[in-house]
Each structure stands twice: as structure tokens, then as C-alpha cells.
Image (cartoon, rainbow, N blue to C red):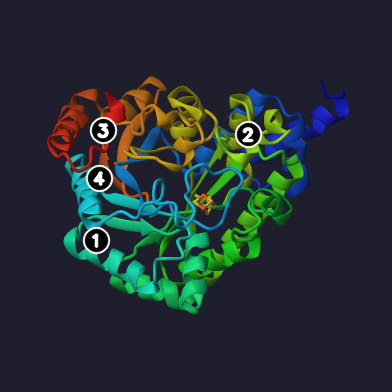
Amino acid sequence: MTDTRTQAHIDQILAKVHDGGRIDYDEGLLLYRYADLLDLAEAANARRQQLNPGNVVTYLIDRNINYTNVCVTDCQFCNFYALPGDDEKGYVNSKLILGNKIKEALELGATRILMQGGHNPDLPYEYYLDLVGWIHEQFPTIEINAFSPSEIQYIGEISGKSWHEVLSDLKAVGLMGLPGGGGEILDDAIRKRVSPKKIMTDDWFGVMKVAHELGLTTTTTMVIGFREELEHRMNHLQRLRDEQEDSLKRFGNAFNAFISWSVMIENTPLERSRFADEYGATSTEYLRHTAISRIFLDNIPHISASWPTQGAKVGQTALHFGCDDFGSTMIEENVVSSAGAITKVSPMMEPREIHRQIRAAGFIPAQRDTAYNILKLYETPEQEAELKSIDDVVKRAKERDNWSPVTLVD
Ligand code: SF4
């Protein structure tokens, strides 16, 4: 229960948001701590309308691909990786497997692949250039978004090249953008505790700055629930907003979207720690965080809901907490699934189901590309008859015995 003076201050800040004004760090913190959840939703929706007016919610048809799970970084929240030499669990996808995955995605109407992997010491610099170049040559219509900042930093380390050289070389062979993975909490106090060997905050933003300079498409992520304080979350948001401002001013290119979710810890070292019960975040906390992010990040155009970690229903609810995008079909998810996310049961949401979720929440679905250009607006449900079904893709995958990507669906 807030006292009258605090509530009056909160009302004043919320009114400023409704009028299109920017809020500062302390105001964000005050809202985060004390504002009524539904008042926050209303203000977040107002911000959404200021940035993306109307009733359209976008989504992307894409596929996540984890080209290798071999990694030397030992993040405390990861159950996906295998150490070098672990031949039972460790893998590097062959081109045959990668090609099949991309073909299946294209059959479903995908316009993008999002490719990320571990920090694998056995893969030389040329591997990455060959991988991206080969995909671009074989599948010229698909957008290649690959390698989060921590992978770029690692590739730079093993090759002795600068981030600028690595990203320029990758761009030259077909890379179009970088996913914002590995952001977690961008505050070193938390990173040093849960992922001390992974990229730190300055370098994460440093890699993204180069990507912005080179005209690559980027998004940014945030994961809550590491036993961080609200101040750590606000530090992340403040740094992000400042960096966004700087990139926009210097390059006219910056993050086009933000997405957050809560940490999954099943079968990870965090689950085995004595603080296990304190990790993670409730759905209410996720929605509160989503609303605060939308309000505070007034220079990042789009906010995506996260159905893979929060579930379809909470993802759908997030559309009423300022999100204007429902994320993507994914088709495959291995990282958070290994740590207990909903995608462990079903790693994809087919376009038809995404449409159903968006419409049921009261919005109009539209397929977009990575840069958030609308590819097709589906004003009426009748237009949805043309959407491809996953059944065909499953059937074809089952006919091939080398790999069946969607066996978890049935
Ligand atoms: S989260 Fe990524 S960097 Fe960390 S251990 Fe897992 S695969 Fe490696």
C-alpha cells in the first residue's frame, strides 16, 4: 500500500508517460516498486500507441538453429552446453543437417534463421565465414541473423581479429544481423556471479555498437530472475536507452526491438544452489517488467512478448502490457528448453496458432521481417486459409531418417 504522497508522485509520472514524456531512472524505479500493475499496463499501452499506433501485432516466421552446443563458458544458468571432448552430448551440425533445417523452415514460410551456438574452441575462424557464406549461397532468400555479441567476442579472441574485422567479414559473406542473445542482466555485478567467463557489459554493447556502425540489424534481450535487485534491472534499462541514443545519433541504426523473459534453471547449477527457490520470476513480475521496459525504453521501437519462456497465455497477456510483437515461430529451441522452458514440450508455434493467440487478445496479426517491415497484414480471419501448416513439414521430416526436427510436436 503506497502512502498518499507517493501515489500522487506516481500519478504524476504516469500522466507524463501518457503525454509522451520521458521518465528518468528514479521515476522508473519508483514505478517499478510501487505502481499498480494495471496502471502500468495502461501507461505501457499508451507508450506503445505513441510508437506503434493502431491495433496490429506482428510476428516473424523463422527458425532458431543452434549450430553447436560445445562451449567453454560454463554459465550457471545453462544446461544446453557440452564441454569440449564430451562426444556423447557435444555436437556440431553438419551442412546436411543445417540445410534440412533451413529447407523445413522455408516450407513453413520462414524469412529468417536465427543461428547461435556455444563458444567452441575447435571451430576456426574460417568455419564461421564458410558457414554463413554457404547458407547465403544455398538459400539466398533467407535472412541470416547469427552470433550474439558473446560469440563475436569469442570468434575475435580465437582469431586475433577485432570485432570490426569479424563483423565486416561475416557481413561480406551474407550476415544480415545479430541476435541480442547473452544480454541476461547487463550489469557486471550480476554477470560476475552467474556467468563470469561470458562477455561483460561494456563489451556486449561494444560489439553491438560495431554492428550498428556496419548497418546490421540488431535486437536486444534481457533475462530477469537472477536474484538481482530492481536497481540492477534499471541499470540495464538505463544503459540500453543511453546506448540506443548514441547509436541512433552516430549511425542512424540501432536496436529495433527488445524482448525479456524470466530465467529457467531446471538441471542447471542454479537449481542445485542453496538459493534455488529465489531464482526465476513470476508471471506477474514478468508482466510488470515488460510494462516498465516499454515505458522506459522510449527510443526502442518494438517490444516482443516471449511465449517460449512465459507460455502462450502470458505472452498473449503481454500484448496488453505494451508489446506490439508476438515473437516468432522458432520451430526449434534448445537452450532455454534444456533448462525447463515451455518449448521443451513444443518447440514451435505455427503461424496459424500465432494468429489465433493474437486475434483472441483483440489484435490484428501481421507477418513481418527482421527489420519489422510488414510483409502481410491479415485483416480478416478468412485470409488465414493460405497459412502453411506444420503437418506437412512434420510428415516430410519423418520420411527422412537422418533427423526429425519436430518429433516433440506429436
Ligand atoms: S549460455 Fe551460451 S555461453 Fe553460456 S554456457 Fe550456455 S552455450 Fe555457453
Q: Is 149 placed above or below 408 here?
A: below
Question: Which amino acid does the dot numbered 4 rest on?
Answer: Ala
Task: Name which of mark 4 and mark 2 comes first in the sequence.
Answer: 4
Which mark is in front, 3 or 2? 2
Which mark is in front, 4 or 2? 2
Q: Residues within 10 Å of mark 4 (few under 14, many from 20)?
A: many
Q: Secondary structure at mark 2?
A: helix
Which mark is in front, 2 or 1? 2
Q: Are marks 1 and 4 in contact (CB under 8 Å)?
A: no
Question: Which amino acid does the dot numbered 1 rest on?
Answer: Ile
Which residue has dot 2 on it? Answer: 271
Asked if residue 410 lies left or right of residue 327, the reply is left
Q: Secondary structure at mark 3?
A: loop
Which residue has dot 1 on it? Answer: 135
Quarter of the picture containing the C terminus is top left
Which residue has dot 3 on it? Answer: 378
Tell me the residue at 70%/25% (across/down): 36
**C-alpha separation, residue under disc 1 versus residue under disc 4:** 14 Å
Task: Name which of mark 3 and mark 2 comes first in the sequence.
Answer: 2
Question: Which amino acid does the dot numbered 3 rest on?
Answer: Tyr
**C-alpha separation, residue under disc 4 versus residue under disc 2:** 35 Å
Tell me the residue at 51%/61% (across/down): 149
Task: Name which of mark 1 and mark 3 comes first in the sequence.
Answer: 1
**C-alpha separation, residue under disc 3 versus residue under disc 4:** 17 Å
